[in-house]
Image (spheres, rainbow, N blue to C red):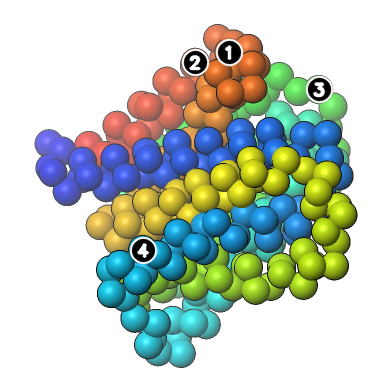
Amino acid sequence: MTLDSRGMLWSLLAVAAALLFALAGVLYRKGVSGSSLHPLLASGLRAGPAFTVMLLAFLASGGSMAKPLEFYAVATASAVFAFFLGDSLFIYGLSRSPVGVVYPVAYTYPFPVALFSFLLTGKTPRPAALIAAALVAIGMWVVYNGGSGYTARGLLAGLGASLSWGMGITLAYIALRYATPVELNLYRTGFLLAATAPALARRVGEVRQARVGWVMLGGLMGIGLGPLALFTSMRMSDAVGPSVVSSGAPVFAVLLAAPILGEKVEARYLAGALLVSVATAVVSLWG
């Protein structure tokens, strides 16, 4: 099967989402390194710039938030699963176990996306998408298998993050039946901002410990432009294929960490990037 123009476009958008997520992760690390900023506060800082850009895009595109109640219910659930459950479990896992334990498990979320998509929408995942997801999972293991130590809580937290992100992405796919990607992401970032604003107002001193500018810029990439690219890709394809490509973000992150954070690029990072690239080709050409 040859790759048509539509397949090429959604694949490029999903790759763009992966790169934006990767850059966001590096910027988050640069922003919170050496601080004790609570994850909830970091999430609130992320939301401000992302919401502002989404609002400007919404106004420029002439969007409308006059949606049925079903949209708001599903979009709210998507935000809760992705931002509050998934992100919190992921950060908790990293605080309890080595990166090499948590990352490979958490970034298997394309498999939960495939499962939840089937359960909630009846859409059977294409074999190529599952093969590509397996390649990405192997790529995660290759990159992050350098850690030592192990705790069950970290492993379970990574699994919980994978399941939560998978549900959040699947619900976002359902919400796109009622809204454009801009409208959906405007609501999700607005919900996150409103939910975290009280905590930010009460704990300004803790916020000042971080490099706020880097965290906010990371938020623009990670929950603003990145999801916008991912949702647009999903609207052109389905939930599974784009989620597979975007799940390669951590491999891109360790490659971006070299020029931005000065970290060394090892051979296993390049091997992981190669596997992610092969997975992208598989899901694009035969997915």
What amino acid is at disc 3?
Ser
Question: Residue 245 appears at what percent x and percent y?
Answer: 40, 40
- What numbered label is drawn on residue 234? none
**Local secondary structure at mark 1:** loop
Residue behind mark 4: 57
Residue 181 in sight in this render: no
What amino acid is at disc 2?
Leu
Residue behind mark 1: 265
**Tag 1 or tag 4, which sits nearer the N-term?**
4
Mark 3 and mark 4 residues within 8 Å of each other at the beta carbon? no
**Local secondary structure at mark 3:** loop
Residue 192 falls in which quadrant of the image? bottom right
Residue found at x 79% / y 67%: 201
**Tag 2 or tag 4, which sits nearer the N-term?**
4
Separation (CA) of disc 3 from disc 2: 21 Å
**Local secondary structure at mark 2:** helix
**Tag 2 or tag 3, which sits nearer the N-term?**
3
What amino acid is at disc 4?
Ala
Quadrant, the N terminus: top left
Of residues 252 and 61, which is closer to you in this image? Answer: 61
Above or below 103: residue 216: below
